[in-house]
C-alpha cells in the first residue's frame, strides 16, 4: 500500500482543478476534455520527442492545465519517494529549520514544491524556494502554485536561466537542489555532458547539501543517468547516497540485459487524474522513474551490512518468488522457495517487496542464490 506521504495533497489537486476550470470549464466535463492535451504531452515526452529541444508547452493554458492535473501529481510523488529514501535510509537531514531549496528546470513546480512540502512535514519551519527555468510561463505557474500550496511556510522566488549552463544558475548555496526531468529535455545531454552537469551541480551545494536528479524510467534516459552517476560517484568527492547503496558501478549496464535499473512506487492517484485517465487507459497503479542523489559531505547513515537493492519486478512462479538484486556491485538472482505457504501468504510476501526495495538476506556474492525460505528475507526499506 502507498505510504501517506505518497498521497497527493488535497490543496495541490484543488489548485489545478481551479486552474483547469478557468481554462476549459469546471466539473467532470471540463476535466475530461483535458484528455487530448494529456495525450499530446505524453507523445511529446516519449514517442514524439523533438530533435532540436522542447517547445515552451507551458505557454499554452490548456497544456498547462493538462500537465497540472495529470502529470504533476506523478512528478510530486516521484520527488517525495526519492527524498524519503535519502532521509530514511541514509539519514540526510536539513541542516537547520530554515532551508534553501533550488528547483532547476522547475516547470510548474511538481518536484520543488513537493520537496518543500515534504520537508515541512519533517520539521523544517521555513523553506526559501527558488524556481529556475527558461520559460516565463513555467515560472509564473511555479510562483502561483508554490505560494498557494505552501502558504506562509515558504518564501518563493523565480529566475529565468538557461538550466543547461550550471555557471548561470543563481549565485546561491542551496541545501537542496532538485532537478526533475532536466537532463531528459536537454537535447545535447549525452553521457559525458550529463556527468559534467551533475558534478558541477554538486559544487553549487552548501556543505551537507543534497542534489536530487530525477529522470524518466525509459531505458535510454535511466541508463544515461546511471552511467553519469557511476562516474561522479567514482570520482568523488561527492558521495552518492541513493538509490544505489555505494559507489560501485552498476553491473546492469552490461550489454544484452533485458532489464535496467529504475524505480517503481505505489501511489494513490487523485480523483481528477483518474477522471482524465478514463479516456486514456494508462496504468496509474504506480509511478516509475530513475534518479540519482549526492551529498556534499558524509552521509549520516551507512546501509546495513549485507544490504541489497531489488532491481527487478517480483516474479511469482511455481514454488518460488524470484527477483534480481544488486549487492556490493554484483547482480544476483535470488530465489525464495514458497513450499508450504498458502496462495494468500505467497501473494502477501511478494507484495511486501518491490523494485527499489532494500533487503537483507544470507549468502555470499554469487550470481544466483536460493534461500531456505521467506523468513530469511529482511526488509530494510521500501518505496
Image (tube, rainbow, N blue to C red):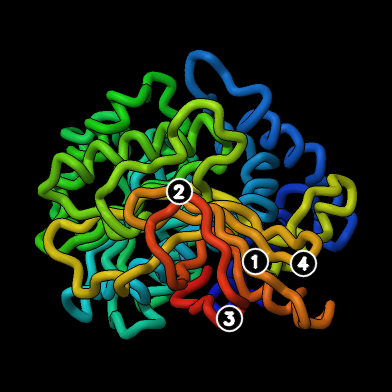
Q: Is residue 204 above or below residue 9?
A: above
Q: In the rendering, which numbered label is found on residue 331?
A: 2
Q: Earlier in the sequence, mark 1 or mark 3?
A: 3
Q: x%, y% of residue 95?
A: 17, 74
SS for callout 4:
loop
**Which one is in front in this view, the residue at disc 1 or the one at disc 4?**
4
| Distance of label 1 from label 4 (alpha carbons) | 26 Å
Q: Earlier in the sequence, mark 4 or mark 3?
A: 3
Q: Is residue 116 left or right of residue 230?
A: right
| Distance of label 1 from label 2 (alpha carbons) | 24 Å
For label 1, the crowd category at 10 Å Cα-Cα, with few meaning under 14, some 14 to 19 and many 20 or more, is some
| Distance of label 2 from label 3 (alpha carbons) | 32 Å
Q: Earlier in the sequence, mark 2 or mark 3?
A: 3
| Distance of label 4 from label 3 (alpha carbons) | 34 Å
Q: In the rendering, which numbered label is found on residue 4?
A: 3
Q: Earlier in the sequence, mark 4 or mark 2?
A: 4
**Which one is in front in this view, the residue at disc 1 or the one at disc 3?**
1
| Distance of label 4 from label 2 (alpha carbons) | 22 Å
Q: x%, y% of residue 123?
A: 31, 85
Q: In the rendering, which numbered label is found on residue 266?
A: 1
Q: Residue at x 47, y 43 (%)?
A: 215
Quadrant in which residue 199 is drawn: top left
Amino acid at each position: 500500500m502507498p505510504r501517506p506521504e505518497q498521497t497527493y495533497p488535497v490543496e495541490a489537486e484543488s489548485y489545478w482543478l481551479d486552474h483547469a476550470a478557468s481554462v476549459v470549464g469546471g466539473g467532470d466535463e471540463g476535466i475530461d476534455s483535458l484528455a487530448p492535451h494529456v495525450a499530446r504531452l505524453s507523445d511529446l515526452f516519449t514517442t514524439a520527442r523533438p530533435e532540436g529541444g522542447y517547445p515552451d508547452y507551458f505557454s499554452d493554458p490548456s497544456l498547462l492545465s493538462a500537465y497540472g492535473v495529470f502529470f504533476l501529481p506523478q512528478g510530486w510523488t516521484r520527488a517525495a519517494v526519492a527524498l524519503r529514501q535519502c532521509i530514511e535510509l541514509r539519514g540526510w537531514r536539513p541542516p537547520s529549520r530554515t532551508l534553501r531549496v533550488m528547483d532547476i528546470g522547475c516547470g510548474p513546480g511538481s518536484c520543488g514544491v513537493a520537496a518543500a512540502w515534504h520537508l515541512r512535514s519533517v520539521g523544517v519551519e521555513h523553506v526559501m524556494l527558488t524556481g529556475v527555468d527558461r520559460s516565463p510561463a513555467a515560472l509564473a505557474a511555479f510562483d502561483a502554485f508554490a505560494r498557494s500550496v505552501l502558504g506562509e511556510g515558504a518564501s518563493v522566488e523565480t529566475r529565468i536561466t538557461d538550466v543547461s549552463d550550471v555557471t548561470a544558475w543563481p549565485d546561491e548555496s542551496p541545501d537542496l537542489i532538485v532537478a526533475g526531468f532536466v537532463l531528459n529535455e536537454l537535447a545535447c545531454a549525452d553521457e559525458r555532458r550529463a556527468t559534467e552537469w551533475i558534478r558541477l551541480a554538486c559544487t553549487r551545494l552548501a556543505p551537507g547539501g543534497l542534489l536530487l536528479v530525477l529522470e524518466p524510467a525509459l531505458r535510454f534516459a535511466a541508463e544515461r543517468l546511471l552511467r553519469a552517476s557511476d562516474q561522479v560517484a567514482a570520482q568523488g568527492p561527492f558521495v552518492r547516497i541513493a538509490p544505489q547503496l555505494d559507489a560501485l558501478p552498476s553491473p546492469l549496464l552490461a550489454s544484452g540485459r533485458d532489464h535496467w535499473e529504475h524505480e517503481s512506487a505505489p501511489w494513490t492517484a487523485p480523483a481528477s487524474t483518474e477522471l482524465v485517465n478514463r479516456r486514456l487507459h494508462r496504468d496509474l497503479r504506480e509511478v516509475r522513474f530513475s534518479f540519482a542523489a549526492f551529498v556534499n559531505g558524509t552521509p549520516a547513515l551507512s546501509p546495513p551490512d549485507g544490504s541489497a537493492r531489488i532491481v527487478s519486478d517480483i516474479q511469482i512462479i511455481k514454488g518460488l518468488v524470484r527477483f534480481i538484486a544488486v549487492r556490493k556491485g554484483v547482480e544476483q538472482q535470488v530465489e525464495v522457495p514458497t513450499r508450504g505457504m498458502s496462495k494468500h501468504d505467497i501473494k502477501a510476501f511478494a507484495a511486501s517487496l518491490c523494485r527499489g526495495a532494500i533487503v537483507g538476506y544470507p549468502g555470499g556474492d554469487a550470481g544466483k542464490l536460493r534461500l531456505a525460505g521467506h523468513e530469511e528475507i529482511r526488509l530494510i526499506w521500501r518505496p
